[in-house]
Image: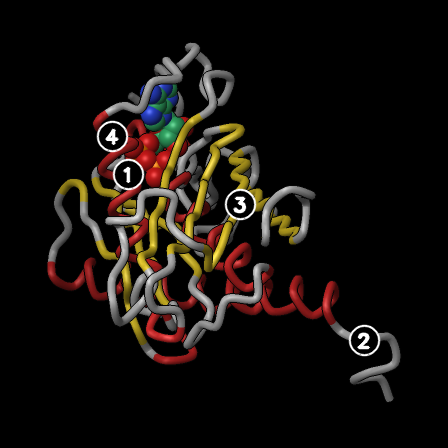
Amino acid sequence: MAKAVEGLRLITEEGLRHDGRRPDELRPVRMEVGVLENSDGSALVEFGKTKVMAAVYGPREPIQKYMVLPDRAVLRVRYHMAPFSTSDRKSPAPSRREIELSKVIREALEPVVLSEQFPRTTIDVFIEVLQADGGTRTAGVTAASLALADAGIPMRALVGGVAVGKIEGVLVVDVDEVEDGVGEADLPVAAAPDIGLITLFQLNGVLTREELDRALEMALGAIRRIVDMEKETLKSKYQVAGEGEE
Ligand code: ADP
């Protein structure tokens, strides 16, 4: 799906990437919470040109009454790419990929949400990819984590995500669409570093055992930085004026 660019060298002689980043460097990251009026919590997250919005409703009474569990809330996640998010217009109908990613993202969030505090309710997470340039599933997890916190839903810890790729033999953090299109491997990871939990781990392509260990280490280092940014974003919205200041 991602397009390769003919003849483009993706790692320069100086070891830099096609956009000038070092191998362990994230794209410029922007995060904002409380961006929507009509949901209980929301967030907008950007990794370079990838822009993802998340909106959360709940805990609330389920619309379909049979969809309840007696001992905890049901977490529902919908990942969707807007028709204008890709260079070729994407059909707005949910694709197999979007159905699969909705499940993968739900499973990346479920272990941190304290759903047992809200039996017989649902928590709905809507993830809308506004612009896709690689790494939308991990940006989706990051946006959802922020939107859940913004909705006041108790969580064990915040989750963040990033993909590590192998490009021309070099392991790089936060792959964009060009890199994804030509890379030898792609390892999306999500984790809650504060409780030492990995909640998403996928591998496309082939890595040696040593490369896998190193790629995971790079992903977890980047996720720690991403989760720190999440905390700063939430603090700057919710810190009461004067609190925490010298
Ligand atoms: P992720 O977005 O998590 O990296 P993929 O590896 O499936 O997921 O996709 C990589 C990138 O390919 C996406 O971020 C997006 O830029 C592009 N892409 C995915 N699906 C489509 C599609 N249906 N049409 C055009 N581009 C797409």
For image coordinates 74% across by 66% down, the residue present is 236
Decide if residue 143 is on the left or right side of residue 70. right
For the residue carrying disc 1, how many other residues have a C-alpha within 10 Å: few (<14), some (14-19), or many (20+)?
A: some
Q: Is residue 120 left or right of residue 230?
A: left
Q: Amino acid at mark 3?
A: Ala
Q: Nearer the viewer, mark 4 or mark 2?
A: 2
- Which residue position holds label 2? 240
Q: Which mark is residue 55?
A: 3
Q: Is residue 59 above or below residue 15?
A: below
User: In the structure shown, which secondary structural element does the residue marked by tag 2 occupy?
Assistant: loop
CA gap between label 3 and label 1 equals 37 Å
- Marks 4 and 1, the one that precedes in the sequence: 4
- Which label belongs to residue 168? 1
Instruction: For ligand 1, tell me if the residue under mark 1 lies within 8 Å.
Output: no
Q: Is mark 4 within 8 Å of ligand 1?
A: yes
Pointer 4 residue? 97
Query: From what the image shows, is residue 103 above or below residue 122?
Result: above
What sort of colour scheme is used for the picture? Answer: secondary structure
Quarter placement of the C terminus: bottom right
The label nearer to you, 3 versus 1, is 3
Q: Secondary structure at mark 4?
A: helix
- Residue 123: give x, y in percent of width and height: 41, 55
SS at badge 3 = strand
Distance between mark 4 and mark 3 Cα atoms: 20 Å
